[in-house]
Image (cartoon, grey):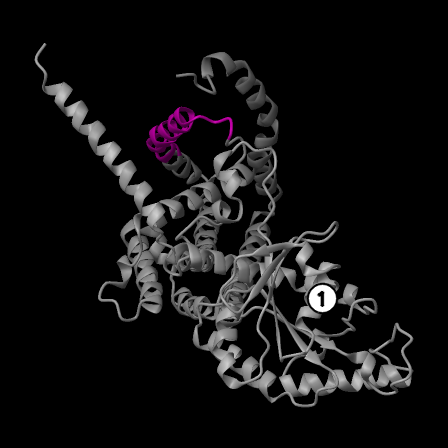
């Protein structure tokens, strides 16, 4: 083994360093001797004792203040949940935070205590996601655990490379060599310190002050270390909680990277990852509100000229690809005309990433819109493992508002200074109140071909809502992957298992052959 440091080769450097610091070290005994000769030793001793006592009192007060502040601040310093989590995940995080608030730094001194605390966190999170299970701790599959191990290993590797100097250079053998040398030098160090303390008794006053200082420093360091260890223990519980939430929430049913970037799984060395799958936009609203006109306006042409997507019965889907804009799938739903159509619309909304609710500005009856939106909100509130897609309201037919004869866009609806702009603003406020939506999520538009207005504003609103829609998309893709048990996939798994068993049987038969 190559040793990183050799005394035989470097003794000249060590001797040179010792000769350089020796004059500085000699100042200490000569300084004490000079004070003794001048007769000032009693004054120096008294001043040193007073200053040491004052330092001890101030440090004790500071330590007490730190402990008190830490105790009062603990509830307010709760780590916030991840923004992409569902309400169910946030509920699990609240339980993790309750366990983290009770964590003590004493668990860091025992491997058994660390393991027990981690298991308690996993049990709490598993019970949260599977309350009716007799064994909630084991509600996961082998592929999920393997994917979790892969993620943790990757995160640990990045952390080591970023925070450990020379981690990419030091070999395990060198680290073990250093550890062996440090362990072997401990007895020599203890003997040396004992000899030094005995020799220091030649000057009892100096020895007394040194022992007082060592005891005082040990007391302060012990107090501060306890606070630090408590915080480290809290961080440990939180990290274990995040891992448990990923495991039991079903996010590890499939690798998001493999789902969102399927081509990347075929070629891990690809120079760039393929684009994300298109967002799914659902156009919904009453009959004749302008849904199909909105789809045509967003496509920029008649929908027959774009790709038609396979969608459930009663829906029409189109894939839209335009330069400078993200690729999207637009789903045109059947118009709402009665309450019986609401459940189908809610089912379609669960499979969407962003909802474009088209509402006519000249149609005062909006009860069916509010009923459908309330049903949609109630569904996502009841199913806490889902993210509700963001909702944008497209206010159509604004050109038909008063004054009827005036149509000279654009109009400033934020600070309206024209009768038409004021009427449009009033309609937006009425729709916001009737549908219980934020007025900032309403975009006024004219959607009839040849006289389009504010379609660019609709795209801008879609792009603004895209980060939230991506979160919904990721959860939707993971949910579909976890629920998907296709016959084709099962057939491939059975075929591969048969080949593996046949190969093992062949190897076993060859091993029994006698030459």
Q: Is residue 33 depicted above or below 66 in this figure?
A: above
Dominant secondary structure of the residues highlighted in magenta in the image: helix
Viewer-proximal residue, 276 or 221? Answer: 276
In percent of width and height, residue 454 lies at 80, 69
Q: Residues within 10 Å of mark 1 (few under 14, many from 20)?
A: some
Q: Is residue 458 left or right of residue 196?
A: right
The residue shown at (34%, 28%) is 184
Q: Is residue 274 left or right of residue 92?
A: right
In percent of width and height, residue 14 lies at 53, 20
In percent of width and height, residue 257 lies at 50, 46
Viewer-proximal residue, 8 or 268? Answer: 268
Q: Is residue 259 depicted above or below 317 in this figure?
A: above
Name the residue at the front extreme.
304
Q: Is residue 165 visible?
A: yes
Viewer-proximal residue, 225 or 435? Answer: 435
Q: Is residue 42 depicted above or below 27 in this figure?
A: below
Q: Quadrant of the N terminus?
A: top left
In percent of width and height, residue 9 lies at 49, 12
The residue shown at (49%, 60%) is 475
Q: Is residue 229 visible?
A: no
Magenta residues (range):
168-192
Q: Place residue 392 in its image quadrant.
A: bottom right
Q: Place residue 13 in its image quadrant.
A: top right
Q: Quadrant of the C terminus?
A: top left
The residue shown at (44%, 77%) is 382
Query: Magenta stretch containing residue 177, yes or no?
Result: yes
Q: Is residue 305 left or right of residue 501?
A: right
Q: Which residue is mark 1?
A: 461
């Amino acid at each position: 083994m190559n040793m990183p440091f050799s005394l035989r080769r470097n003794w000249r450097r060590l001797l040179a360093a010792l000769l350089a610091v020796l004059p500085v070290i000699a100042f200490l005994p000569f300084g004490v001797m000079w004070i003794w000769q001048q007769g000032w030793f009693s004054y120096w001793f008294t001043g040193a004792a007073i200053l040491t006592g004052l330092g001890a009192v101030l440090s004790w007060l500071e330590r007490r203040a730190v402990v008190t502040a830490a105790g009062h601040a603990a509830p307010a310093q709760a780590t916030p949940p991840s923004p992409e989590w569902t309400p169910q995940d946030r509920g699990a995080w609240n339980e993790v935070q309750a366990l983290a608030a009770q964590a003590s730094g004493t668990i860091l001194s025992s491997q058994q205590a660390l393991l027990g605390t981690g298991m308690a966190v996993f049990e709490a999170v598993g019970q949260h996601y599977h309350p009716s299970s007799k064994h909630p701790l084991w509600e996961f599959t082998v592929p999920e655990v393997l994917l979790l191990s892969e993620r943790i290993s990757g995160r640990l590797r990045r952390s080591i490379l970023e925070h450990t100097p020379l981690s990419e250079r030091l070999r395990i053998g060198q680290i073990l060599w250093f550890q062996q040398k440090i362990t072997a030098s401990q007895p020599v160090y203890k003997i040396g310190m004992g000899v030094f303390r005995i020799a220091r008794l030649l000057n009892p006053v100096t020895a007394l002050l040194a022992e007082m200082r060592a005891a005082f420093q040990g007391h302060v360091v012990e107090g501060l270390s306890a606070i630090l260890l408590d915080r480290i223990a809290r961080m440990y519980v939180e990290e274990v909680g995040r891992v448990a939430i990923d495991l039991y929430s079903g996010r590890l049913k499939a690798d998001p990277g493999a789902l969102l970037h399927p081509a990347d799984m075929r070629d891990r060395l690809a120079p760039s990852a393929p684009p994300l799958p298109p967002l799914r936009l659902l156009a919904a609203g009453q009959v004749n509100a302008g849904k199909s006109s909105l789809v045509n306006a967003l496509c920029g042409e008649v929908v027959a000229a774009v790709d038609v997507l396979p969608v459930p019965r009663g829906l029409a889907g189109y894939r839209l690809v335009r330069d400078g804009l993200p690729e999207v799938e637009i789903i045109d739903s059947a118009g709402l005309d009665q309450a019986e159509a609401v459940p189908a619309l809610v089912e379609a909304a669960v499979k969407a990433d962003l909802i474009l609710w088209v509402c006519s500005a000249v149609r005062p009856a909006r009860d069916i819109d509010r009923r459908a939106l309330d049903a949609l909100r109630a569904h996502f509130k009841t199913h806490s493992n889902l993210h509700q897609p963001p909702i944008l309201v497209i206010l159509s037919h604004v050109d038909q508002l008063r004054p009827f004869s005036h149509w000279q866009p654009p109009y400033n609806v934020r600070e309206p200074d024209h009768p038409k702009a004021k009427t449009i603003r009033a309609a937006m406020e009425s729709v916001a109140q009737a549908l219980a939506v934020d007025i900032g999520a309403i975009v006024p538009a004219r959607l009839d071909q040849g006289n389009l207005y504010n379609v660019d504003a609709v795209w801008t609103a879609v792009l603004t809502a895209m980060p939230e829609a991506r979160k919904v998309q990721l959860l939707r893709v993971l949910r579909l992957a976890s629920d998907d048990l296709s016959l084709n996939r099962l057939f491939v798994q059975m075929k591969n298992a048969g080949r593996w068993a046949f190969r093992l049987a062949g190897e076993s038969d060859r091993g029994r052959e006698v030459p």
